[in-house]
Amino acid sequence: MSVGQELLDVPLPQMVSDLAMGIAEAQAALDKNSLNTTLALADETFTYVPKVVGTIDETKDPVEATIETIKVKDMPLIAFIKPTWYQFSETKIEVSMDIKTSFSSSTKVGVSAKFKAGWGPVSVSIKADVEHNRKFGKDVQGTSKLSVTLVPVPPPPSMLPEVDIKRIEKPAPAVPTPP
């Protein structure tokens, strides 16, 4: 079976349907991967240090320097790293065929005659050669091209947990009031 015939044998609606189902299956796999990444980031925690405070107290002799870190423990990674989600934004099918046919015909005719004469009977012979050729040619070339474009999209809003970060600050020292 020729390439051209194979391309012609696939109905366009079936080709489009197969492409759509392939994209749907690939999209489901991409979404499942992004969901698994989201869950992994939500389960993984680390110690978060939002602020480091340094104090230099020049009223003391010798001068004192202290560093205080405010730590919020067990912050989920998802509060800082958002997983990437993808979507198929464009799909193209291009099918092209190039069909070339050729035909040639040739005929050759050859005639020869012989004549013999003498004191007796006369002999004559005629010879005819006819050659006829017909050539048919067909050349079919087919190509198909499929291209898809994936783009990153934000995750579904309900997919990511709401994360509130509360800042706990040390109260400022009370300023003494003059008597």
Image (cartoon, grey):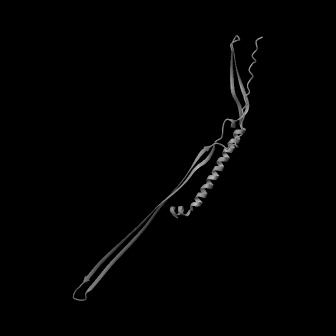
**Residue at point 68% right, 24% down?**
52
From the top left corner, tell me how far across and down residue 58 is, in percent.
68, 13
Q: Is residue 7 left or right of residue 137?
A: right
**Residue at point 38% right, 72% down?**
133
Residue 164 drawn above or below residue 59: below
Residue 121 drawn above or below residue 33: below
Residue 150 drawn above or below residue 63: below
From the top left corner, tell me how far across and down residue 4 is, in percent.
51, 62
Q: Is residue 112 left or right of residue 132?
A: left
**Residue at point 55% right, 64% down?**
9
**Residue at point 30% right, 77% down?**
111
Residue sitting nearer the eye, 62 or 122: 62
Outermost residue toward the bottom? 120
Outermost residue toward the front? 179
Q: Is residue 6 left or right of residue 171?
A: left
Count of numbered circles on the image: 0
